[in-house]
């Protein structure tokens, strides 16, 4: 899209020259773009007739356009010293600055030229192209339109306007003004029906904005030749992926690959093979993708696109070290590679190397200012480390005539990428409408989370709970310590201790039962969509009772978008002492249930989730009874900084308090980010010399 071309007519009129020599062959070579041959043609005449202005101009153009613009500039400069006010010499001299990419030097020269020659087509068009190369597209468009006022049917001016509009459209796309970019590209299509550059850039806009239908329509419009149809098919495959139809995307890439092989077009074969492997990865056919990449590595050693495929496979299979290694190789080959720089930033983020992710993403934005994906990654990083306050209100009731109202306020402040603190306060009041027992509790807690190393966090909490019932009150300390680790790519492991006070209902609050929980939790994910979650908790209580709990869940991820999984849960609980009159404490409790969980988007601002589980539960040696659990909620993003949740849940699982128990909770949660960015971000930028 940023391609810029200079189209300036050179008038070869010199009747006296024609009378002396026939230079028509040389003129034809120049007009046809055969600049090396033109140079060889005119070179002898520069020696035999060194004072001939037209010969020098023709030779200078041939030298400059055949790859030596510096020498051409010198030729025209010397010629201008002899013909200081000659328009033909001036305009060729000024154009040589464009060949040298010295656009800033050319700009004032052309500005003066059009001032003196306000209706000269060549001068106006040269000025327009100069401004275009300086990316001053608004002014460039104004001047190229002036050139077309002078010569309305001139094709060279229309071609220049096309490239100016391509550059201008790219400017708007980079600034995420996609409508304006689309409008400019459609204007190009009015001048040049089915122009390939305009169509490809238009399709890119539709891909960025996820307008899959229009993207596909544009690619179909582009596919006029066998070669173009292959390019179109690869684009359509990407559109299908964006539209979450990965199976169709894979079929499309297979067709493109077959056509490219039949056409024997090396570049198209490579592009089609690249898209084919990408589609394999999208479809989670990782074994096949790995084999294909291995074959490509042998055929195309040290090629960036092959290393990018290997890195992408690493990202999908959680082998982030492999991804970083390959992205580093890409950047070593091409420091300006977008895939290499942003790919590495994403891999560092996934590896929990946050400072390095920040540095690499800002580096990407230095190379590609305002690029949407890089800006999105910065936004994602910032959200994780921006201070916020959270307010939650919940109301619960059960079939034991217990009701409770809970209010919780919390403030979380990350002080660095390694260290964050949270302070919270919770007030809970509970009442039994049958016994008229009432109680309330106040919990003040401070949490400190410290990142020991990437993927390893230590969480500690200290606080006090103050409980009041009738005319009595007590205060107890609460403590929590948890080590959160990711020892393997697909394994999350938590080791924890928690000291809490039982506050489910008024009767239990009155007994001042303190529970000390020792827990082991792990979650294992696999590349083949199967997962295994387990939780083991041993609890010692101040009433000398003990509880052992095992919960394990085997699940299968059916869909990615929306995230849909089904599975089977098993729970086993045993208490040392049975105190059925006080709280549910069987010697043996078992539950087996099937569950389903779905999470997705309603629109760009609204997410939802729902989870349902049903099965059988066994208390001691009693007959099995049915159990049912359900939970659902909706999250709405009011703005970038304000998010709200509403949720409800129901359970009749016996382990909550007693057999035959039914429990319902409804709640609202509000979250507000207190600042626009992390508190430490400016200091981090200064430390690592980040200018953004």
Image (tube, grey):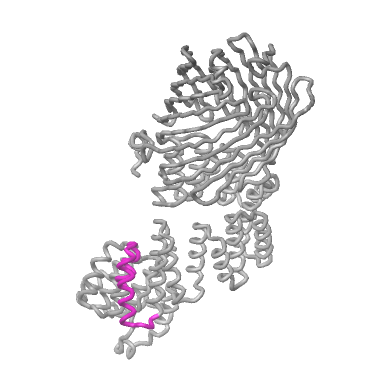
Is 625 left, or right, of 418 in this rendering?
right
Residue in front for this viewpoint, 283 or 275: 283
As drawn, 488 above or below 187: above
Quadrant in the rendering for residue 273: bottom right
Name the foreground residue: 332 vs 382.
382
One can see residue 577 in this view? yes
21 versus 429 height, above or below: below
Q: Is residue 86 visible?
A: no
In the image, residue 642 lies at what x, y percent? 42, 42
Q: Residue furthest top?
A: 544
Q: Position of residue 443 (x, y in %)?
A: 46, 21
Q: Residue at point 43% right, 27% down?
A: 422
Which sits in the foreground, 15 or 128?
128
Residue at 54%, 19% (x, y): give it: 437
Location of residue 161 by image quarter? bottom left
- Magenta part of the chain: 126-154
Q: Which of the image's four quarters has the N terminus? A: bottom left
Which quadrant would the C terminus be assigned to in this image? top left
Whether residue 136 is in magenta: the answer is yes
User: Residue 53: horizontal and vertical position, in percent?
Assistant: 28, 79
Magenta residues, dominant SS class: helix
Residue 503 percent coordinates (x, y): 54, 20
């Amino acid at each position: 899209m940023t391609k810029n071309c200079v189209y300036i007519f050179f008038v070869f009129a010199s009747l006296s020259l024609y009378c002396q020599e026939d230079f028509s062959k040389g003129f034809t070579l120049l007009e046809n773009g055969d600049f090396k041959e033109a140079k060889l043609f005119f070179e002898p005449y520069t020696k035999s007739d060194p004072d001939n202005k037209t010969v020098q101009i023709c030779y200078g153009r041939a030298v400059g356009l055949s790859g030596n613009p510096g020498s051409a500039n010198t030729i025209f400069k010397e010629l201008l010293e002899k013909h200081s006010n000659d328009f033909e010499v001036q305009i060729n001299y000024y154009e040589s600055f464009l060949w040298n990419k010295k656009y800033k030097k050319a700009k004032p020269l052309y500005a003066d030229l059009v001032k003196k020659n306000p209706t000269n087509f060549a001068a106006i068009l040269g000025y327009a192209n100069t401004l275009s190369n300086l990316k001053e597209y608004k002014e460039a468009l104004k001047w190229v339109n002036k050139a077309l006022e002078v010569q309305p049917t001139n094709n060279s001016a229309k071609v220049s306007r096309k490239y100016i509009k391509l550059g201008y459209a790219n400017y708007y796309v980079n600034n995420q003004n996609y409508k304006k970019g689309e409008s400019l590209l459609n204007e190009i299509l009015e001048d040049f029906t089915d122009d390939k550059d305009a169509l490809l850039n238009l399709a890119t806009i539709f891909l960025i904005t996820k307008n899959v239908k229009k993207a596909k329509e544009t690619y179909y419009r582009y596919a006029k030749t066998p070669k173009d149809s292959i390019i179109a098919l690869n684009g359509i495959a990407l559109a299908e992926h964006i539209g979450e139809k990965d199976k169709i995307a894979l079929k499309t890439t297979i067709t493109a690959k077959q056509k490219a092989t039949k056409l024997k077009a090396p570049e198209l074969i490579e592009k089609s093979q690249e898209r084919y492997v990408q589609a394999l990865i999208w479809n989670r056919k990782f074994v096949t993708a790995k084999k294909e990449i291995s074959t490509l590595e042998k055929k195309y050693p040290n090629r960036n696109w092959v290393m990018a495929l290997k890195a992408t496979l690493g990202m999908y299979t959680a082998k982030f070290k492999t991804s970083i290694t390959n992205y580093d190789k890409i950047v070593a080959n091409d420091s300006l590679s977008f895939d290499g720089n942003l790919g590495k930033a994403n891999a560092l983020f996934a590896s929990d190397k946050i400072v390095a992710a920040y540095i690499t993403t800002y580096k990407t934005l230095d190379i590609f200012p305002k690029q949407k994906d890089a800006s999105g990654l910065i936004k994602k990083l910032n959200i994780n480390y921006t201070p916020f306050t959270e307010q939650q209100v919940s109301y619960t009731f059960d079939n034991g005539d217990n009701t409770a109202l809970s209010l919780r306020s919390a403030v979380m402040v990350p002080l660095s990428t390694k260290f964050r603190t949270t302070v919270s306060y919770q007030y809970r009041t509970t009442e039994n409408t049958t016994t008229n027992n009432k109680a309330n509790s106040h919990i003040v807690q401070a949490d400190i989370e410290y990142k020991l190393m990437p993927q390893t966090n230590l969480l500690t909490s200290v606080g006090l709970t103050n409980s009041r019932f009738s005319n009595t009150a007590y205060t107890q300390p609460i403590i929590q310590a948890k080590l959160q680790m990711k020892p393997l790519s697909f394994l999350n492991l938590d080791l924890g201790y928690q000291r809490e006070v039982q506050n489910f209902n008024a009767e239990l609050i009155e007994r001042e039962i303190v529970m000390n929980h020792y827990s082991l939790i792990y979650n294992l994910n696999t590349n083949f969509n199967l997962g295994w979650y387990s939780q083991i908790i041993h609890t010692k209580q101040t009433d000398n009772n003990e509880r052992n709990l095992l919960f394990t869940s085997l699940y299968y991820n059916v869909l990615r978008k929306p995230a849909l999984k089904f599975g089977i849960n098993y729970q086993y609980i045993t208490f040392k002492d049975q105190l059925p009159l006080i709280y549910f404490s069987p010697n043996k409790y078992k539950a087996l249930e099937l569950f389903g969980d779905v999470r997705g988007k309603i629109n760009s601002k609204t997410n939802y989730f729902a989870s349902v589980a049903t099965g059988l539960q066994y208390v001691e040696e009693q007959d099995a009874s049915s159990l049912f659990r359900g939970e659902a909620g909706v999250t709405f993003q009011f703005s970038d900084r304000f998010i709200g949740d509403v949720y409800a849940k129901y359970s009749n699982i016996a382990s909550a308090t007693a057999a035959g128990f039914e429990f319902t909770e409804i709640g609202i949660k509000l979250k507000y980010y207190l600042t626009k960015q992390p508190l430490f971000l400016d200091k981090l930028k200064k430390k690592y010399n980040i200018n953004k």
